[in-house]
Image (cartoon, grey):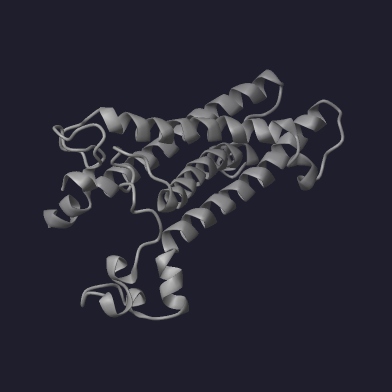
Amino acid sequence: MLRPVRDNALSILFFALFVLALIGQSIAGYLENNERLVQHSQPPEAFLEFLTSSEFVVDVAENWQSEFLQFFLFIAATIWLVQRGSPESKKPGDEGVGSDKEQKVGRYADPESPDWAKRPGLPRLVFSNSLLLVMGAIFTLSWLAQSLAGTVVFNSEQAQHGQPPIAWAEYLVTSDFWNRTLQNWQSEFLAVGAMIAFSIFLRQRGSSESKPVGVPHHVSAEESQ
């Protein structure tokens, strides 16, 4: 019974941390929101009402879209771009999508290969790009949710100051929207760039994100094998 847990421990850990962090964010946000309402002589909201509010949705969605954009761009960039010495990159000379033999598709597929890897045409094309497609779809939906919820929040603040509401398309070109968006993007891009660069010269014994301790800085993990 413990084997499935051991075999999936990494994903279980991070999904559990995600749920705990989301619960913590919802409670902290609920308390902060009610404090703000009381300060403005307004009645506090119920917890469920806050969870379905635009204020909560926009805070969650703006983080999700930046995270999935980060992975979408990183996955796409690592197809064609390399960083010598980084375990986050293929070795120089391996740029590109790879041959059918290297990717084990079509007639080169193993007996245990996924069925879609064996099928010609559209099924194989979709499966060959499924990771990028799903990451891009989640980013797009999260970005859409952020922009729609952000419009509601922005118009609510406009109403408090006696200003007219604006349309969704107008909100997309406001400084409020791009401030929310870019403050997350810049931190994600910095984190990815730092991971790529630091992993060239720094090590963590036992981690799959690090090269073996004794491998020279300029050599990638693939080249050392």
Question: Toward the viewer: 71 or 27?
Answer: 71
Give the residue at x 20% y 31%: 204
Closer to the camera, 62 or 115? Answer: 115
Q: Is residue 192 left or right of residue 144?
A: left
Q: Quadrant of residue 58?
A: top right
Q: Position of residue 42 (x, y in %)?
A: 70, 26
From the image, which quarter does the N terminus lie in? bottom left
With respect to residue 7, does 124 lie above or below?
below
Name which residue lies at 49% across and 60% down: 133
Name the spot of residue 5 as percent of width and height, x first: 18, 52
Q: Give the mark count.
A: 0
Q: Quadrant of residue 109?
A: bottom left
Q: Position of residue 30 (x, y in %)?
A: 54, 31
Q: Name the quadrant containing residue 114.
A: bottom left
For the point 18% across and 54% down, the residue is 7
Nearer the observer, 105 or 67: 105
Residue at the spot 54% in from the left edge and 33% down from the top edge: 184
**Residue 172: percent from the left, percent from the top?**
73, 42
* Residue lying at the far top of the rendered structure: 39
Q: Is residue 60 left or right of residue 174?
A: left
